[in-house]
Amino acid sequence: MLQKVLSASCRSRQRSTLSVFKTLPGQRITRLELGGAVNTPQEKIFVAAGSEVRGFTKRGKQFLSFETNLTENIKAMHISGADLFLCASYIYNHYCDCKDQHYYLSGDKINDVLCLPVEKLSCIIPVLACQDRVLRVLQGSDLLYEMEVSGPPSALALNSGNGGDSGEEVLYGTSDGKIGLIQVLHASPVEKWKIGNEKKRGGILCMDNFDILGDGVKQLLVGRDDGMLEVYNFDSANDPVLRYDHALSESVTSIQGGCVGKDGYDEILASTYSGWVTGLTTEPIHRECGSGEDLKVSQEMQNKISSLRSELEHLQIKVLQEREKYQESSQSSTAISAVPIFNVNDKFTLSKDDASYSLILEVQTAIDNVLVQSDVPIDLLDVDKNSAVVSFSDCDSEPNSNYLLATYRCQANTTRLELKIRSIEGQYGTLQAYVTPRIQPKTCQVRQYQIKPLSLHQRTHCIDPDRPVNTLTLKGQFSFAEIHSWVVFCLPEVPEKTPVGESVTFYFKNTFLDTQLECTYRKGEGFFKSDNISTISILKDVLSKEATKRKINLNISYDINEVSVNHTLKLIHPKLEYQLMLAKKVQLIDALKELQVHEGNIDFLIPEYRCILEEADHLLEEYKKQPAHLERLYGMITDLFIDKFKFKGTNVKTKVPLLLEILDSYDQNALLAFFDASA
């Protein structure tokens, strides 16, 4: 076990681990939980593999093998006394003494589950963390209520390990890095606090509560998918404050506090994606290295060092022998070279903060290179944590629809790579990542990610009803499942499973422009409302094409609200004005710096120019992070202009050069007047 140190006065040192028991190889274990009788030490180990749950004592004796009636693999599990709570992708099951008790079908994928402490409450209340940014609170097989949170919840934990004083407090962490605490009440939940993700760190994978500081109050321990390990303390107002953080090179899959290595010294244990177990300890090291005479190593330590050196030399010899053996066999006439198998942990998610997609690739061995190819126009954005060297290849986009070909060459021992891309709505296709690890013989895995027509839209559960909207109506001989599959094709974050019931309504917000979309559909009918004409235009084109592929005749009608055009332009205005001002300031930086070199004193400059010089580094960094941002806004306004008149049956593409001239000398009133005068 590799051990690292919390306190600045401490230093790390290795300790040997002792295996207590091992289970036989079998299906991949997807979840591990501790359990036992209520109000007793939770010492029994429960693991979920496939659709089976097995139980072991702390000595390794198996006492339970329970084959559930789930047709999918178990994704989430919680143990409370004799009660077992299991979740597959969409299905929740509650068992008591291995007998089926309750069942619930969720509207979206279930990421985690827990139950409020039975010993504090008079009834069993499970909580589901679902991908559609909702926590669902159940009672039996019924939905008690649901609560929208700030991101897709990926992990749940009881506050202080027991739900707090009331037993009703639940911690949640989201896949976009936010943390919150809610109090689950019978009438409605109350959000007590929420931590944002201003530092743009990874998503939350695990949480625990433990008094690592020894002050009598349990701290919140958090593990993220970018390798960050965090410790939050609580101030006098009971609000969380970040006390410690530590960066690991791999995603933190599990975290726990306890006394492990040495009596009297608490530690934080974390496991990572490739299988490392890392510990942070509070143990101080009293002896410090001084002169040679002062440094004394005990006989026990000398024996350990000697043993480790001997073991290391033995392993090095064994590696050399196996390498030579492989080389000899590969050169023989009867050589058989097997393709090595490796797993890729990947995540492709839309970030609301900067309207970009984050692609995370993680391998259990070092990555050699990653080739990224796209058949639609996309921008690759800089990622500060990315140390890979990127090179671009020329692409012939016309005949082959190949718009991007980039290679990321990773440094030695890199197991995790994060990329950021920004797409253009209306242009859809496939992004492919070819992942090649540093293993022999050379092999590669391909991962594909769909860039959807309305790729910058994100699910929400409430919209502004007072905005001017445009309506698209579809009618035809299509089933509920067929129109749902079209919506899945067009929009992200829509569950692939057809919703239960006769109809469904989804709400979306554009993360770039803050426009909104309402989708309501059923068998034979679909209604789409948006305050952005371009959104309606994209939906009309794509849905028509999808229906044509299936030879389904559609009756398409639309109702265009002229007021919505000015409304959308006003939403774009602050972003466009800011980007134009940023570009103007960046253009002045070189001239102002040259003037500063020649004159020495810049006091004669007006305050605006002095401010540009003082903030030059920040402005250049921000401008660098926003490639093609201004062109993207120009493109959206141009599309809005063309789409407005397309619904009237007028082609105004010849007026686009005049529109671009107005944008270059941008004035909001002049732009609004141009849109109105072109009618």
Image: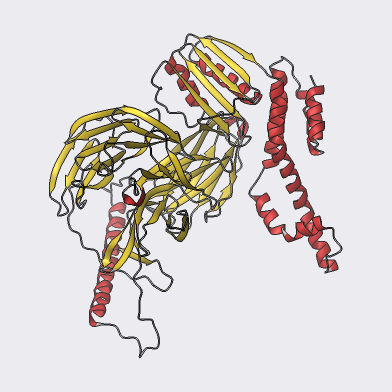
Q: In screen coordinates, is 62 left or right of 570?
A: left
Measuring 85% from the left and 67% from the top, which residue is drawn there? Answer: 599
Residue 24 point in image, percent of width and height: 17, 48
Q: Quadrant of residue 21?
A: bottom left
Q: Quadrant of residue 141?
A: top left
Q: Is residue 343 visible?
A: no
Please name whichever residue, 23 or 53, is drawn nearer the observer in this view of the structure: 53
Colour logic: secondary structure
Q: In screen coordinates, is 661 left or right of 230?
A: right
Measuring 53% from the left and 14% from the top, which residue is drawn there? Answer: 548
Residue 390 point in image, percent of width and height: 56, 51
Q: Is residue 598 visible?
A: yes
Q: Is residue 620 above or below residue 6?
A: above
Please name whichever residue, 611 or 225, is drawn nearer the observer in this view of the structure: 611
The residue lying furthest to the bottom in this view is 293
Q: Quadrant of residue 192?
A: top left
Q: In screen coordinates, is 402 left or right of 243?
A: right
Residue 466 point in image, percent of width and height: 63, 25
Residue 447 point in image, percent of width and height: 44, 39
Q: Is residue 329 above or below residue 663?
A: below
Q: How many numbered discs sit on the rendered protein?
A: 0
Q: In screen coordinates, is 644 left or right of 328?
A: right
Measuring 63% from the left and 22% from the top, which residue is drawn there? Answer: 469
What is the quadrant of the N terminus in the image? bottom left
What is the quadrant of the C terminus in the image? top right
